[in-house]
Amino acid sequence: MTPMRVVRWGVMLVCLYGAQAQHSTGASESALLDVENRWVAALVKADLVALDTLLVDSYVDTDEEGHRSDKRVVLAVLKSGDLKMGSIKLSNMRVYPYGSFAVVTGTAAQAGTFQGQPLKPTVVFTDSFVLQDGKWQAVASQRTADQRRDFRARQ
């Protein structure tokens, strides 16, 4: 095989691999956005069965106040009615895939209460996911109250 032919084959393989990787990344992004939407729907419905499948057993949640909880506690506060989600609207989501691991960032406008107190109306979040047995599951979530909205309201 001539050197030029080797270069052509190499370029063609790189192009094919790049197209496949881009398709795979697009599929991962779509699947992760779908998981995010199913997650918030399950929270609003307090669907413990759906949440149990969406969260890994070692799931870690860090809320707007900096409190950490595990999967068991998250499910328990929903079951008890301490956490009541009226609505959650996601926006500005961005997916960062890394093979079988991914991070999703975004903003959530939410209405609900925790132990009778209103939730922060807007949070920014970072969710981490792992791909196991062909499905994406949440490993960790961290939320921060969006102070910019509160600041603008005081002006």
Image: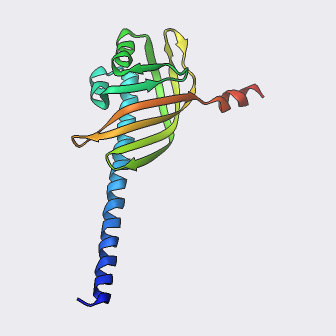
Image quarter in which the C terminus is found: top right
Residue 146 position (above or below residue 73): below
Res 31 → quadrant: top left
Residue 34 falls left or right of residue 141:
left
Residue 66 falls left or right of residue 147:
left
Residue 141 is situated, as x and y percent measured from the top left of the image, at: 44, 30
Numbered label tally: 0
Residue 154 is situated, as x and y percent measured from the top left of the image, at: 75, 25
Residue 125 is situated, as x and y percent measured from the top left of the image, at: 50, 34
Q: Nearer the viewer, residue 43 or 58?
A: 58
Residue 48 falls left or right of residue 111:
left
Residue drawn at (39%, 13%) of the image: 77
Q: What is the residue that sits farthest to the right in this orientation? A: 155
Residue drawn at (33%, 60%) of the image: 21
Residue 47 is situated, as x and y percent measured from the top left of the image, at: 32, 22
Residue drawn at (37%, 9%) of the image: 80
Residue 91 position (above or below residue 20): above
